[in-house]
Amino acid sequence: MKRLLCLLLTLMLLPLPALAEEEEELLAAAELDVILKDNRTELDQTALRDNSDSTGYEPKSASSYIFSTEISGEQPLYQVFLRMNSLPASAEIQVKNAKDKYVTVATVTSPGPEFVLSSSEPITGSIRLVIRFEKAVPLHLKECRLFGQGGLPASLHQWRRNERADVLLMTDALTDADPTALKTWSDAGASVAIAALTAPSGEILAQTDALWEAGLRLAPLYGDFRAMEGDAAQKLKTWKEKPVLKTLTEWTRCFQPLLLLSGSEVTQTLLPTVCENAYNYNYETESAAEYGLWIVPDSCHVTDDVTGHIAALAPRSYDALRAWCAEDFASAQHGDPATIPYPADRLSDGYLAEGEFVHEDPDNGLWAYLSPTVQVEIIRYEQPEFPRVWFETDVKFKPETEKFQQVLYANASFEGQQIYPETLAQTSGMVLAINGDYYPYRLDRKQAAGNILRNYKPLYDYSDKNKRNFPNLDTLALLDDGTLQVYAGNEITASQLAERGNVHDALSFGPYLVRNGEMRIYDGSSWDTPEPRCAIGMIGAGHYRILTVEGRMPKGGARGLNVNDLSKLMYSQGVSDGFNLDGGSTMVLIFMGRKLNLTGKDTSIGKPRNQHELFGVGTSTLTHTDMLKSK
């Protein structure tokens, strides 16, 4: 590993045993009395548990170290605390399985000099602790303590990782930071993190202990640049500006600070560029995919009034990022929705007390529908300079009477039965209909279907076998209360969703675009290709936003969007969660029985592929029936 950037911790969450009177505090974990061995040599257990850095274990230099022990079933292992005056590349717990092979059950990458390895499942039997370094280095192991389930002693420094920081100080070395200033900032109520371009040497623990005493609880980050003297120009000439910018940008994306501080001439020089890079997904897309994009609200140098800046910190918000996402699409031409002649007796919540209202204006790209339970407004947008064409559909419905759900062809499960989507929509009298995940396409090609649940019944569970790169088979769950939830494919199964009893449909395609209010970015060629797209997002219960993006058009027509631009467009809509459905020739947007979007590259109208289902909301006797009359 050449980069020691954000400390990536793969930990499973510890269970939180509930105490009496509804208290959610951790019971104290029992410390396990076991014998650790380095090959056949028994380690001095007292020296590894005495909270003293003057004792410990220092074997000969190596690139990896393995310590073994036996864990009884009466006292299973859950956590290991390690403290060392060394910087390992990784550490892990391995357990011997039934095939007499060691498998990893907990791991941490670039953990720093002290850390906790943890598992949510009990560990018993023959285990190994494996500590690896970039190259052969001496291990100065000061503490190695094994615990059961529960809270660890407060005397142990339990650094938190992969958390957002209020204040991030970026500097050349840890020794550049003034512990007194750090304590002042943390005492002001800010969560403070520090990241140094050079890794500490010598008494590493003394430096990190000083940070702990200053009130820092977020694990410091280290770069892999060689420590050197000189001014900013000399250092950047040696270190090279490009890798330094990359490192600083990754740190900024990782911590997403409200206040970004520079603690050296190097970081101060590069700070403006770093702040711009942090929200540009085309810059180091890999780290953007790992940590997300971020617009830093404030930045300054440590010589400024940092305490004043901290006092002025606003609550964490992604509004600036949403606004930036909208800028890319602000030049689009579209009809004015204020010209839609909505009824004067429309209720305060936007619904009608009775009856229906339908407005269709394809010339100006405006469509609308109102009833006592459903509201639909569709606006067509065009950016000729790209060129781009898309539809934004705002959908509201009353979850107590309506669902955004599947409409199935002939009310039968898919067995090679397909129909033209407009015909299906008109047959069912659907007010609004879009395509779903078209999972039969994958089944026909003997590929993994993903999580498929229809009408509360799980049909297929996620599997990694026979899985293509795209789609990645993330999961969209539609709930009875009008909300939707998105998941990584391997995070849950359709069977587990069905057990909840409130998920009426689950679709598999992806990737998800927004989750819990945070936009997701992807890297790789599969995500960077402009295509026709269909996506759905949630603003609130019973309030969705649907994007239908045309593409593959001939003669300079719309090209479509890549996945990251689709994420930006969806995020600009203000959704909390968003999901990419099937696009291409599957994609349809049907209003009152008529398809609004162009599909396909061979004709000016374009034909979508026949499908066995649609998803949508609302039924009406006012839907068009021309497809039925022509049969």
Image (cartoon, rainbow, N blue to C red):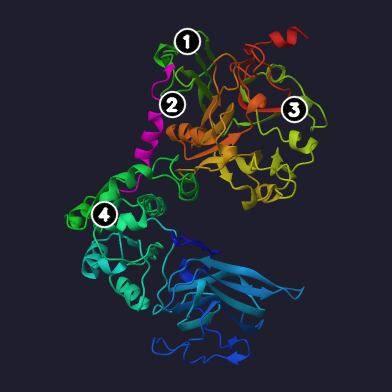
Q: Is residue 427 above or below residue 269?
A: above
The type of residue carrying mark 2 is Asp
Q: Residues within 10 Å of mark 3 (few under 14, many from 20)?
A: many
- From the top left corner, tell me how far across and down residue 198 is, in percent: 36, 65
Q: Amino acid at mark 3?
A: His
Q: Which residues are magenta?
A: 314-333
The CA span between labels 3 and 1 is 32 Å
Contact between marks 3 and 2 (CB within 8 A): the answer is no
Which of disc 2 and disc 4 is earlier in sequence?
4
Q: Nearer the viewer, residue 86 or 589?
A: 86
Q: Is residue 254 above or below residue 53?
A: above
Task: Tell me the residue at 62%/69% (across/down).
Answer: 105
For the residue pair 200 and 445, the one nearer the viewer reads as 200
In the image, which disc is placed on residue 349?
Answer: 2
* Separation of marks 3 and 2 at Cα, in angstroms: 35 Å
User: Callout 4: 10 Å neighbours few (<14), some, many (20+)?
Assistant: some
Give whichever of discs 3 and 1 has the lower sequence position: 1
**Mark 4 or mark 3: which is in front?**
4
Residue annotated with mark 4:
233
**Left or right of 321, for residue 551:** right
Does the magenta run of residues contain 317? yes
Assess whether residue 284 is covered by the magenta stretch. no
Q: Are the residues flagged by discs 3 and 1 in contact, CB closer than 8 Å?
A: no
How many numbered badges does the structure rendering display? 4
Question: Which numbered disc flags the more N-terminal residue, 2 or 1?
Answer: 2
In what quadrant of the picture does the C terminus appear? top right
Kindly report which numbered mark, 4 or 2, lies closer to the viewer in this rendering: 4
Name the residue carrying label 3.
612
Callout 1: helix, strand or loop?
loop
